[in-house]
Image: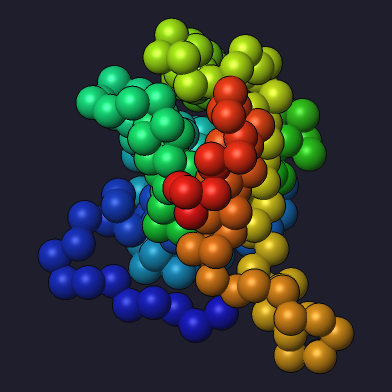
Amino acid sequence: MARRPRRAGADPRDTILRVAGEEFATHGFAAARVETLARRARVNKALIYYYFGSKLGLYRHVVRQGVAGFAARMHAVVDGPGSAEEKLGAWIHGLAAHFSEQPMLPRIMLRELADGGVHLDNETLRDLTSILPLVLRLVRQGTNEGTFVEIDPIMLHFVLLGSTMIFTTNAPIRRRIRQLGFAQPPLEIAPFVRHLHTFALRSLRKDPDHAHSHR
């Protein structure tokens, strides 16, 4: 992998975190090497240990930073103005936008899920746990407004989050399938967001036949 030059005046801590996110997303925690990370970030290994204490400390900081930003974004959706239907659309767009802007986060989290979450610290788990009550609040707002039926917020959360994570992380596979001519899977995320929004509305609305009007 070509080494990306560090910008003049860039904070070495920020550079380390950016490169670490790329390394952990590509190789996973166990296979990522501090030596490689230091070389790519153009810093001494000692500086990494000075800032973060250990490879695990660095990994947890990368994950915590990504999850905290994601949680803050989703809190802003639910805490903001608008009807439940409008917030549902903003929620789905927020998921897609966050994972598109930070493509390393879903890749790291999928690896971490496969490992059973053994590397996650308590602060990160707290931020992750704060997401589900937001989904519950969104659904309750819709039922109070008379537009949504009662639905299990956990299932809704898993469908929206899981499908968006999978779509954003399997883009290289879709591109390869297209290149080989096996099929023509979508490459752009916008059509996926529209379909997911329509699917969610049809699942939630008391009058699902009107869900198509939100495409």
Q: Dividing the picture into quarters, in which one does residue 87 lie?
A: top left
Question: Who's the residue at 42% across and 31% down the image?
Answer: 85
Which x, y percent locates residue 95?
47, 44
Residue 207, compared with residue 175, is above or below; it is above
Which colour scheme appears in the figure? rainbow
**Horizontal arrangement in the rendering, residue 59 relative to residue 151 (left or right):** left
Question: Who's the residue at 62% across and 13% down the image?
Answer: 150
Q: Quadrant of the N terminus?
A: bottom right
Question: Who's the residue at 40% across and 14% down the image?
Answer: 145
Would you say residue 131 is visible in this rendering?
yes
In this view, the residue in front, 78 or 28, is 78
Question: How many numbered circles does the render carry?
Answer: 0
**Horizontal arrangement in the rendering, residue 114 relative to residue 117 (left or right):** right
In this view, the residue in front, 66 or 200, is 200
- Residue sticking out furthest to the left: 9
Question: Who's the residue at 30% across and 49% down the image?
Answer: 13
Which x, y percent locates residue 46?
41, 49
Residue 173, compared with residue 45, is above or below; it is below
Would you say residue 161 is visible in this rendering?
no
In this view, the residue in front, 111 or 59, is 111
Which x, y percent locates residue 92?
48, 42
Residue 37, compared with residue 62, is above or below; it is below
Which x, y percent locates residue 59?
53, 40
